[in-house]
Image (cartoon, helix red, strand yellow):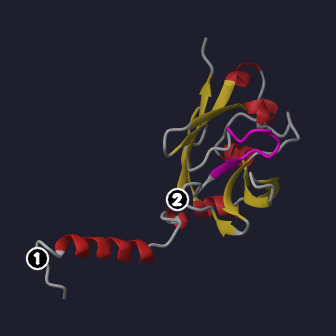
Amino acid sequence: MIPLSLNTAPIAVVWIVIWVASITQYPVYCQTEAFLSVEGEVTYPRKVTFEMLSAMTSVEVAVANREGDIDTYTGVPIATILEASGTSLGPELRGGNLTKFLLVVALDGYEAIFSLPEIDPEFTDKISILAYRLNGQPLPAGMGPFRLVIPHEKRQARWVREVKAFRINYAVQ
């Protein structure tokens, strides 16, 4: 037990903060407790847990990072997640349903938007995934537990980090 006086208290507090920081494991979230909300114009609004996501058919995509090295992301195609929630895709994606869009929301409030044909495999051969692993490891803090990966885009502006929700809405005039 360290006796604390007015003279030693700041030193003790600094030591405790350093000790706590040294034992903290990263990522700071628990991936097994993570979930993704799928809401809006869907038949089955739900919270998709990490267990549910990891039970879906996953794919790997290899992309170059900013340093020019190749990173391999593991995740589930966005279309698979949306289909499981009853989003209008495939033959149903016509007429008024073509005015629906996906809004991807991050924990920090960052948002990106996609038209449903950009995601639907009946409209495009390009794949976009919700990743939960990077090079075989859980996504690091600040990136995960889930991240959007769109390998065919030249810029990563829509590669949303820390994804918390998919919202399907209609565009309005």
Across and down, in percent, residue 102 comes to 65, 34
Determine whether, in the image, residue 13 is placed left or right of residue 154. Answer: left
Q: Which mark is residue 115?
A: none
Q: Is residue 45 visible?
A: yes
**Label 2 vs label 1: CA separation?**
42 Å
- Taking the view exactly as shown, the residue that stands out farthest to the right is 125
Snapshot quadrant of residue 126: top right
Q: Does label 2 or label 1 sit earlier along the sequence?
A: 1
Residue occupying the point 67% across, 39% down? 158
What residue is disc 2 on?
Answer: 34
Q: Residue furthest left?
A: 5
Circle 1: residue type: Ser
Q: Residue at x 79, y 37 (%)?
A: 120
Q: Is residue 48 left or right of residue 14?
A: right
Q: Is residue 76 above or below residue 42?
A: below
Q: Residue furthest bottom?
A: 1
What residue do we see at 62% from left, 61% from top?
139
Residue at which label 1 appears = 5
Q: Three-letter amino acid code at disc 2?
A: Ala
Quarter of the figure that contains the N terminus: bottom left
Image spot of residue 19 (x, y percent): 37, 77
- Give, as a single range, the part of the protein colored magenta: 147-157
